[in-house]
Amino acid sequence: MTAGYEPVDSPDETTVFPYHDLEPPTTADIYRARRVVDRHLPRTPLVRSEALSAEFDADVYLKREDTLPTGAFKVRGGLYLASGLDPEFHEQGLIAASTGNHGQSVAYAGRTFDVPVTVVVPEDANPSKVTAMERLGAEVLFHGETFDDAREHAEELATAKPYRYVHSANEPALVAGVGTAGLEVVEDLPEIDHLFCPVGGGSSATGYCLTVGALTDATVTGVQSAAAPAMHRAWSEGTLAPHERMETFAEGIATRVPFALTTEVLRERLDAFELVEESAIERGARDLFVDDRIPAEGACAASLAAMRQQRDAIRGDTVVFPISGGNVSPDLLRTLLDGSSLE
Ligand SMILES: *Cc1c(COP(=O)(O)O)cnc(C)c1O
């Protein structure tokens, strides 16, 4: 049996291997990624929300990333990364740790480029997301209680066998692919004033900073749950130390460990970073379903909750937030619609 790769020194708590490049992508890299992403994925609609435009007395647009195959923006990054995969990894394939959407992205990319995929998920992973990964041909391994347990297991497996470990943030190609969403926003709505983006590992917010932030006059605001503020702390204090608290129901933004590559870009370019309460995220998710008929994941509703905290600052302006994912389990949707609190 061939062994995997020995980890190299990592600036954050996660494992990185010699093939990981921690240099952030540039806006030009995102334009290069665009050529590949456009070949494989449809452009996603940017749709004005009448309900939210009325509520905020503003022009509010939703970037419908939930309409992508896999139902979340991450597939942009997985596809671009896999498109340039070194042939040495073709046999053992890709491995990733995920609460669901990153795993689906890597699974979709592996199927597209005919490379095997293994995804490690926490034991209580969203069953709809697990089924979707398996349907795309990935082997799914259950390990541990949290994303970080699953991540550490994937990192051990990638040390034992020559997988290409697809990190969820310390991957310039992945971030460049994800950033293509922002180029679409810039083209469709150059008059944008504000973009609100949920932050988990930070790839999406990094992509918007390098596109909407770099190419328009808009401000880019990151959002996390006050119950899971790891990246917020990394951004405000410059520390990559893990955060003890991680209790959000919104699995897309449930991270405890900040990542080096994305933190570097966000500290330099993100205009503001809001923390929102879990109850406000729940209310936002319910409103998006009732008023806009979108089964939005909690992560998307975090943006809406942050806009509600910044109501006066955005009145009269043009505002965009991504519907970053629509993979809501029926159980969660039922609970949200019942109006009972998830806590
Ligand atoms: C992953 C994810 C996020 C957070 O994106 P990052 O790039 O990890 O910050 C937000 N929403 C959804 C639906 C996600 O799957």
Image (cartoon, rainbow, N blue to C red):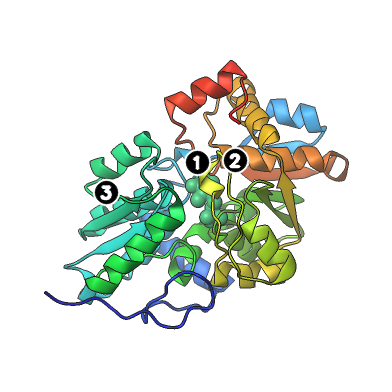
Question: Residue at (29%, 37%) from the top-left corner?
Answer: 131
Side (left or right) of 168 relative to 238: left
**Residue 84's x, y, as percent?**
33, 70
Q: Would you name the residue on which mark 3 appears?
A: 140
Q: What element carries label 3?
A: strand
Does residue 235 appear in this view? yes
Disc 2 versus disc 3: nearer the observer: 3
Q: Would you name the residue on which mark 2 appears?
A: 300
Side (left or right) of 111 relative to 99: left
Q: Quadrant of residue 201?
A: bottom right
Circle count: 3
Q: Quadrant of residue 206?
A: bottom right
Residue type indicated by callout 3: Val
Query: Answer yes or no: do the residues labelled 1 and 2 have beta carbons within 8 Å?
Result: yes
Q: Quadrant of residue 92?
A: bottom left
Question: Residue at (54%, 54%) from the top-left corner?
Answer: 255
Residue type indicated by callout 2: Cys
Q: Would you name the residue on which mark 1 appears?
A: 325
Q: Which quarter of the image is occupied by the N terminus?
A: bottom left
Mark 2, other Cα within 10 Å: few <14 / some 14–19 / many ≥20: many
Label 2 residue near ligand 1, CB within 8 Å: yes
**CA–CA distance between discs 2 and 3?**
26 Å
Mark 1, other Cα within 10 Å: few <14 / some 14–19 / many ≥20: many
**CA–CA distance between discs 3 and 1?**
20 Å
List the single residue furthest toward the left.
Answer: 1
**Residue 156's x, y, as percent?**
31, 68
Identify the mark nearer the N-term, 2 or 3: 3
Side (left or right) of 41 relative to 160: right
Q: What element carries label 2?
A: helix
